[in-house]
Structures are given as C-alpha cells and as structure tokens.
Amino acid sequence: MLSLVAKNEKLHSVAVEWDTAAELYEQGRPDYPLELLEHLKTLCEFGETTSIVDLAAGTGKLSRLLVNTGCAVTAVEPSREMRAALSRELPTVTVKGGSAEAIPLDDNSVDVVAVGEAFHWFDSPRAWQELVRIVRPGGLVVAAWLHRNVTDWQQQLLAYLRPYAQAVPNADVDDVDGNRSLQGFPRNEFASIQPWSIVYEQPYTMSRLRQMYESYSFISLLKTHERNKVLDGIEELVRREVGVEQDEIFSFPLQLATWSTVRLKGRLA
C-alpha cells in the first residue's frame, strides 16, 4: 500500500513490514460503500474503453468497487504479498508492481486514477508529477479515506492510539484533511479540488476489529509483547464503551471522505 522511496526505488520500511501483513489487511480493513461507486459515476462517464488505475491498491479493497464499472482496472502496488492477494481475489484486474512516484504506465494513458487510504504516504510532489504525466486531459483523480472517529467511543480510541501513531512518520489516526496529499498540487494542470463525504456503517466483530488495528503500520511495527498490549487495550475500551462480546456483531461507523480533481485540457497561465 505504500509508495517506493523515490531515490533508490527500495520499499519504505513500513511497506516491508506490511509485505507480511496482507492477510490481516484483507480481513480486517473495512470495505468501501456502494455510495462511492455512485459518486464516481457522477464525476465520470464510464465506457468500454475507460481505463482505471487503483494506485497503491493494497489487497484490492477499492479495486473490488472499481471493477463494477465494467471498465478495465489496473492495480499498481509495491508490496509483492499485497499484489498476490489482490490477484487471487480479483483475477480480471491487471496487477503491476510500482509506486506513486514511479507509475509503470505510459504517458496520457489513464482516464481515472483512484487512491484509497494511501495518498498521505506518497512523496506528494513527485506523485503529482506522475499523475500529470499519465492522466489524459479531462481525466479524473480521486482520493478516499475512511475515518474512524464518528462516535464518542471512537474518539476515545483515537486518543489512546495517537501516541503510537506519532512514532511512525506519515501515520495519522486523525482525520486526513488533504493538506499533506495536496503538497505540490499542480494548479495549472488540474481543476480545483472538490470534496465529498458520507457516513456509513459496517458490521464488525471484536476479532475483526483486532485484525484491522493490527494491520495499522504503527501497531504492526511494535514488538509482539507491546503490540498485544495495545490490541488488548483496544478490546477493553470497545467492550466497555460499546458493550459487545468476542463473537457478537456490532455496528462500526465510518466516515468516507474524498476529494476529486479533473486534469485540465489546456494549462492555465
């Protein structure tokens, strides 16, 4: 899910760690709602020849939604294990190894680029230059994040996790407001940013919740004893505040926040 380090194309250290966590990521991370697909349809007219790229695709959480457009989807992902998991689940998706700073696609070859929960990891100025290169005039770029701070108990959980997140560069349990992802945004190449968001709910169990947080970079990097201590603390807080048992299904609220922009057909002066 992470980009490659630009200078020598080696994987970011956190990406190396995630290379062994594909199963946790796939099982624990939430799915994108169908409302996102409907929103994309208001932004772009999808046709048989529309080309879509899921950039930093991970195990294909967002690709699952994108294939429902009926268009050709290409997933670009640096982690070998993530790519393998994506290929197993979505055999019709073309999967390529690569990063946001070195996208393995031709100039002016892409109609839609979608980024799910990853743009804040990129070297943003370099990623934007790659998007300028590959996105056709009139093409669409969309970035999405799933925020887990909808309720009071989720706010308490974020406060509990914040000190751990602060130890890992670019990891952020707070709302991603787009500032980091828009560093180096080429205003003469893309139209103004358009935000959109909704709140929705996903069914979770305590075991799936534990998998989700264990897949977080700043938790997966901890030593085993410390990682289990943090995960136990998450369980204790949720049991206390939500009142759920281990195998009981409960509602986990999420806010889907996105921004989108369109590649200009002619440069602004």
Image: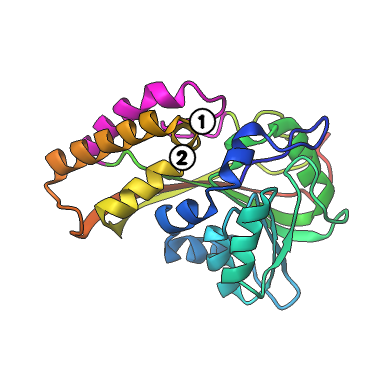
> Looking at the image, can residue 10 be seen?
yes
Instruction: Looking at the picture, tell me which residue is in the foreground, 225 or 151.
Output: 225
Q: Label for residue 216?
A: 2
Instruction: Find the magenta span and give its range.
Output: 151-179
Residue 2 versus residue 230 in the image, above or below:
below
> Looking at the image, can residue 255 be seen?
no
> Contact, CB < 8 Å: mark 2 with mark 1?
yes
Horizontally, residue 138 falls left or right of residue 41, namely right
Q: Label for residue 171?
A: 1
Horizontally, residue 232 falls left or right of residue 53, namely left
* Circle 1 crowding by C-alpha within 10 Å: few under 14, some 14–19, many from 20: some
Residue 141: percent from left, percent from top: 66, 51
The answer to which of marks 2 and 1 sits earlier in the sequence is 1
Residue 181: percent from left, percent from top: 61, 34
Residue 127 versus residue 255 in the image, above or below:
above
**Which quadrant does the C terminus fall into?**
top right
* Circle 2 crowding by C-alpha within 10 Å: few under 14, some 14–19, many from 20: many
